[in-house]
Image (cartoon, grey):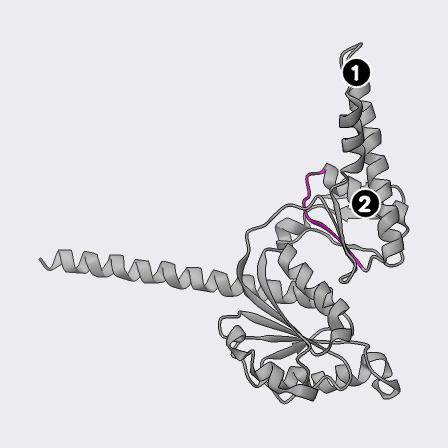
Amino acid sequence: MELQVGNYADIDLNRSARQGMPEVIYGAGKTAEQIVGIASAMKGRGIANILITRLDPKKAKQVRQGLAAERKTQGGQKHAQGKAGQVRPEKETEKASEDTDFTYDAVARIGIVNRQETKKQGKIVVVAAGTSDLPVAEEAAVTAELFGNYVERIFDVGVAGIHRLLNRLPAFENANAVIAVAGMEGALVSVIGGLVACPVVGVPTSVGYGASFGGLAALLAMLNSCASGVSIVNIDNGFGAGVLASKINRQSLHGETEKRSEGRADVRLQNRADIATM
């Protein structure tokens, strides 16, 4: 099922049913008006936690204002349809216009429309080599949290001071996936890949000096990692890493549930066998 918005968008309404996650709005390259139109249409169909990635602060302000205006217009239409002579209190009107159901994370450059709390399950650890990698790391962390994963952040533990990472190793023990974000030479991914038992998603960033070639050096280094169980996403793609780790975590939890169910079934079969021999 699809939903067309103007002549610029065709929303995939069944994506959540197919993939477990609704369609995401990529903010870069879209106007604020287009983002408002898409997000409003999705919210109108009951879609929660509408994610807008790569949204800069200036455009985020415009989106907030656009959503407020949209809501005010809808509120005015509902008011016009009410009983004749019925007047809505002024304070209530102001509250409706200001409450846009829009939140914005300036570090992650992510906006969220119609946010609803989700139960957090499993565990994903997001690791950033340096403070300069935080925008990409936070993009991954916020994405994973929004899709129902418990996320633990470990930041500024790059290989220039490897003891900082080693001191935090207990935090990795019960993780189902690790997202490792690093620029420069990208060595952090190989180090973590050799220390943990769960899958590691490496995210090369464009942080680095001239020879880093905008993250290409980190990308190639991660792709050539000798650590097993490591998978790499594109340069600065924190969102992609958050989605991949979320699916890994979800599959891990599904496997644990199946094991528990199999264990209970084995107990039931054993009980029946015991009864039959009595």
User: Which residue is under mark 2?
Assistant: 38
Is 46 in front, or is 206? 206
The location of residue 238, given as percent across then percent down, is 73, 67
Is 3 in front, or is 191? 191
Vertical order, 38 against 271 (above or below): above
Q: Quadrant of the C terminus?
A: bottom left
Q: Quadrant of the N terminus?
A: top right
Q: Residue 52: within the magenta?
A: yes
Is 46 in front, or is 76? 76
Crowding near the residue tagged with mark 2, few <14, some 14–19, many ≥20 C-alpha atoms within 10 Å: many
Crowding near the residue tagged with mark 1, few <14, some 14–19, many ≥20 C-alpha atoms within 10 Å: few
User: Which residue is under mark 1?
Assistant: 87
Give me the residue at 79% from left, 16% from top. Answer: 87
The magenta segment is 45-53
Apparent side of residue 206 relative to residue 19 in the rendered image (left or right)? right
Apparent side of residue 96 relative to residue 118 in the rendered image (left or right)? right
Apparent side of residue 119 relative to residue 188 in the rendered image (left or right)? left
Specify the amino acid type for callout 1: Val
The location of residue 105, given as percent across then percent down, is 75, 56
What is the distance, in whole Å, between disc 1 and disc 2 at their CAs? 31 Å
Give me the residue at 53% from left, 73% from top. Answer: 171
